[in-house]
Each structure stands twice: as C-alpha cells, then as structure tokens.
Image: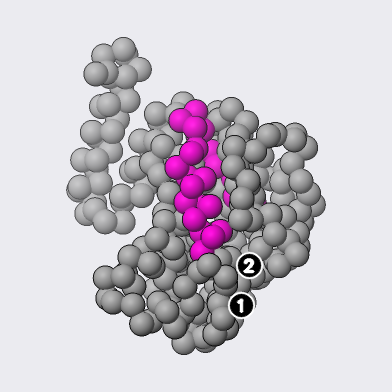
Amino acid sequence: MASPAQDLGPVLDKDGVRLTVDDAIATVTLTNPAKRNAQSPAMWRALAEAGRVLPGSVRVVVLRAEGQSFSAGLDRQMFTPEGIEGEPTFIDLARSSDGELDASIAEFQAGFTWWRRSDLVSIAAVQGHAIGAGFQLALACDLRVVADDVQFAMRETSLGLVPDLTGTHPLVGLVGYARALEICVTGRFVSAEEAVSTGLASIAVPGDQLDGAVRDLASAILAAPRDAVIETKALIRGAHGRSYDDQRAAERAAQARRLRDLAGLGE
C-alpha cells in the first residue's frame, strides 16, 4: 500500500503507531512492516493513546498499515517463556489474581475500543494478512475497505486462546453467529471476495487503489453535515438492540433534534 501523498507531521509516533491529522481526517498507521506489524502491549498502549490525543476537529479516522501485511497478529515473542522485555509474560498473567488479570486484559482492549466513538467514523484500509489481533483491529473500525489480496483469519482458538480484543461482537454483527463461530474455531482464511459478499468489508480493490478508495469514502462521509452523521450512526448502531417500535421512536427523536437544529431552535 502506498504512503499518503501528503507528508504531515505526526501527532504521535511510537511503538509501531503513527498518528497524523489533516483537518477533519486523522490517519493512524501501523509502522513496523519488517515484523508484518505484529502487535504487542506497547503497540496497544500507543493505539489507546492515539485515541486520547485525537483533536476534536476530526470526523473520520483512517487506520492503515505500512508494508505488505496489515498485521500478522500477536508478536510471537509473547508466546515464549522470556516474553517481551518490560512486559508480563503469558505465564505472569496467568499467575496474577482474577482482578489483576481482568484489569490487564481490559488495558489491552483499550486500544481497540475508541474507534467506534459516536462522533467519529473509522475506516480500516486492509491489505495482505490480518490475522488474530490484526483481524480484531480491523473489526474495531466502523468500516473496512480491503485490497484484493487480503486474508483475514482468527487464529486464537487454534492457540488455545479466545479472541479477546473486542473482535467477537462486531464479527457476529457483520456475518452472523454461525459464520462467525466457524471462522473463529477453524482459524481459516477469509478472502476479499468472501469479506465483501458477507458484509465484513464494504469494497475490495486492487492494492494500488486502496488509498484512493479510502480517500473517496472519507470524502463522501465528510460531505454530509457532522451532526447528521453522528445521529445516523447512533441510530444504526443501536438498531440491533431495539425492537422495531423502539427503533421507530428513536428515529422520531433523532429527526426532531435535527429539524430543530436546522431551524435554529436547538438547545
């Protein structure tokens, strides 16, 4: 995937994560292509920090990755007895108390949770392998645009683990219970064609067109008034948990707010 044409000074650049901001669009880039953007707790903390320092002017966040792979998943060094220097090993985590272990996993998840904020629309631009934690990071975003060489896979179960980086809820919502279960317990690859046909991705394009497709999508989102996008996102996100009549009521309330705002009568 080609680098963006504009060279912007980073707001954050650490531990394999770079954040740049161009007015209403922020770009979060995974920057360790030599390791296929393998993920570590330090990367997760940097991703969480990117969400915290995001300027209020940002309406669209693009998540992309340098190199041929979006992310190959967990850094395999985490599976060794030595682990990653300065980080707890899996054995250390397993030996901690229930509360400590829960808090550790919650801290890991923090880098995956802010992408669905109500005031943002997030787009993952995914090429090559997106495995395990990489798949879950793509799932953390509202939308996914993929290169035609993409290969999604959820490999945690084959390692004796479960997907715990917030990926299971959006996966079920996108492809349904049965397909989500099958993808997770088999660890098989999901191609670009299947991703689009099942709703996992919005569109698949040749790799050299990935940046352009994402820019076009971001521009289309920015063309609509921000408050209308925020209200619409809230309606769509909440629809699954509401009854038909409750959703109708939510639509009426949201439209009333928009009409009063457009008429200059909002609070």
Rendered image: mark on residue 184: none
Residue 71, x across and y down, in percent: 64, 65
Q: Is residue 88 left or right of residue 195?
A: left
Quarter of the image for residue 79 reads bottom right
Residue 205 counted in the magenta span = no
- Residue 76: give its label: 1
Tags 1 and 2 in contact by the CB under 8 Å rule?
A: yes
| Residue 210 position in % (x across, y down) | 72, 50
Image point (33%, 65%), residue name: 103
Q: How is the image coloured?
A: one colour
Q: Position of residue 90 (x, y in %)?
A: 46, 79
Return the residue at label 2: 38
Q: Nearer the viewer, residue 197 or 183?
A: 183
Residue furthest front as drawn: 86
The residue depicted at 26 percent of the width and 56 percent of the height is 241
Density class for disc 2 (Cα within 10 Å; few <14, some 14-19, many ≥20) is many
Earlier-in-chain disc, 1 versus 2: 2
Q: Amino acid at mark 1?
A: Arg
Total number of numbered labels? 2
Examine the image and state in which quarter residue 126 appears: bottom right
Q: Which residues are magenta?
A: 41-64
Q: Secondary structure at mark 1?
A: helix
Task: Measure the alpha-carbon separation of dots 1 and 2.
Answer: 8 Å
Which of 200/89 is in front? 89
Residue 227 in the image: state x and y as whole percent. 39, 29
Q: Which residue sits at x=71%, y=46%? A: 211
Residue 153 seen in this snapshot? no
228 left or right, relative to 145? left
Residue 135: name its quadrant: bottom right
